[in-house]
Image (cartoon, grey):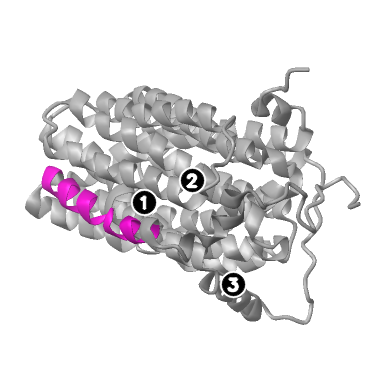
Amino acid sequence: MKKKLALVQLAHHREPALLVAGQTVSQFGDGVALVALTLLVLDTTHDVSGLAWFAAARMTPLVAFLLVGGAIVDRFSRRVLLLVSDVMRAVLTGVLVTMIGLGALRYWELLIFAFLFGVFDALFMPAMTALTPEIVPEDLLPAMNAVRPLSNNLMGNMIGPAVGGVIAAASTTWAVGVDCATFVVSAGALFMMNPTPAPVRDVATSMLDEIRDGVRYVRTTRWLWSNLIVAAVVNALVFTPMSVLIPFFLRHSLHLSKLYVGYAFATFGLAGALSALVASNLRLPRRRIRVMVIYWSVGTLSALVMGVATNFWEVLIFPIVSSPCLLLGNVIWESMMQSEVPRELLGRASSVDWFVSLGLTPIGVLVAGALANVMGVSTYFVVMGLAGTVPSVWILASRKINAVDERRVSGEETEEPRPGTALVGENPA
């Protein structure tokens, strides 16, 4: 009998199907709001630094509260925490819609909104990573880790921004209102899922001790901390600033209309969606670390095209190349985290992952805005695209960092499930 595609197999499992469905709708709303808020800030400030401060306002609390969020995730039901995060973000977005509709919204209030949103992002990210292996069979983890960015790229980075550009051109209030409604839908999907238990833990341990345990695990696991350095550098220097600098470049350097900003985000999403569709049915490579870092390096170097871009179509080469490379590398990374990290530590290890990989981005996006004002967007991407690949060379050359894959390369690794990997609703053998 011909084996079904991994995506088809995944769809037959109720819990991941509900989770993906809800998140797909929510990501569409995020895509609409991404364009609407970007244009709102640009229209308010007319300056790349203003947009950079808005991005930093959202990322700063995300980074600051991630470790606490990870400890919370390892104490309570991950499904309940995702539900809380979606409900609170729906409330915040509803307040923002009201203020925009009344014409009472000012720039500093937008910064407060971004900050509060980042707080609940800090809870959502590690909770999503930790919930996934609880509801998905281990052999389908790569498919789940690909289908999530597939829906994110298709809806959040392609269809959502394209629609968002059209709606925002007519009404920012309606555009942000769409995002509010989609959070409600996502919360409804989480509510329909079966309850998941809280992780098993030592009740005598304080939250601070649990955070230390998570940090200690990552710090003593070579393949984890070394690759987090690469992620921190390229996120801060290249990939986070691109969401600020490319819209500014299109509007103020190429003098294109608002619709082109939506088209640029949509192109990023289309490229990511197609690569996610491919990645969902790929087996993990034996040399996971090296293949992952090669993907990330090619994506980083694609920033060099901005040095010669003089029209919209040349600018698109950057997202068309970088989006698939980022996604393919991230699918390998998440699958490694969920397979190699002990289940009881996964929430905290994931929060450390997000904390380090995003830790420099608030500073990075502000520095990018300042440097781009001085040297220009094109020169900035050339310099940082080259600088961002330096740590990758170290990873590729290091035998100690790649030792985690030695048994896979030699063929000694077995396919037996790791202890403690029973799914929700199943009884351990």
Q: In this view, does 95 lie to the left or right of 382?
A: right
Q: Quick one: label 2, few (<14), some, or many (20+) residues within 10 Å?
A: many
Where is residue 37? Give x, y as percent: 36, 40
As measured in the structure, the alpha-carbon distance from the residue carrying label 2 to the one carrying label 3 is 20 Å
Q: What stretch is highlighted in magenta?
A: 378-395
Where is residue 193? Give x, y as percent: 77, 40
| Residue holding disc 1 | 110
Q: As displayed, is residue 272 above or below residue 417?
A: above
The answer to whether one can see residue 88 in this image is no
Task: Please report the residue visible at 16 percent of the width from the left and 57 percent of the height from the top.
Answer: 370
- Secondary structure under badge 3? helix
Task: Please report the residue visible at 68 percent of the width from the left and 38 percent of the height from the top.
Answer: 140
The answer to whether one can see residue 192 in this image is yes
Q: As displayed, is residue 41 above or below residue 387?
A: above
Q: Quadrant of the N terminus?
A: top right
- Secondary structure under badge 2? helix
Main SS, magenta residues: helix
| Residue holding disc 2 | 330
Q: Which of 390 and 21 is in front in this view?
A: 390
Q: In this view, does 149 lie to the left or right of 37?
A: right
Q: Does the magenta stretch include residue 379?
A: yes
Q: Nearer the viewer, residue 6 or 358?
A: 6
- Please give the label number shown on residue 217: 3
Q: As displayed, is residue 216 above or below residue 140?
A: below
- The answer to the question of whether label 2 and label 1 lie on touching residues, with beta carbons closer than 8 A, is no
What type is the residue that disc 2 sits on? Asn
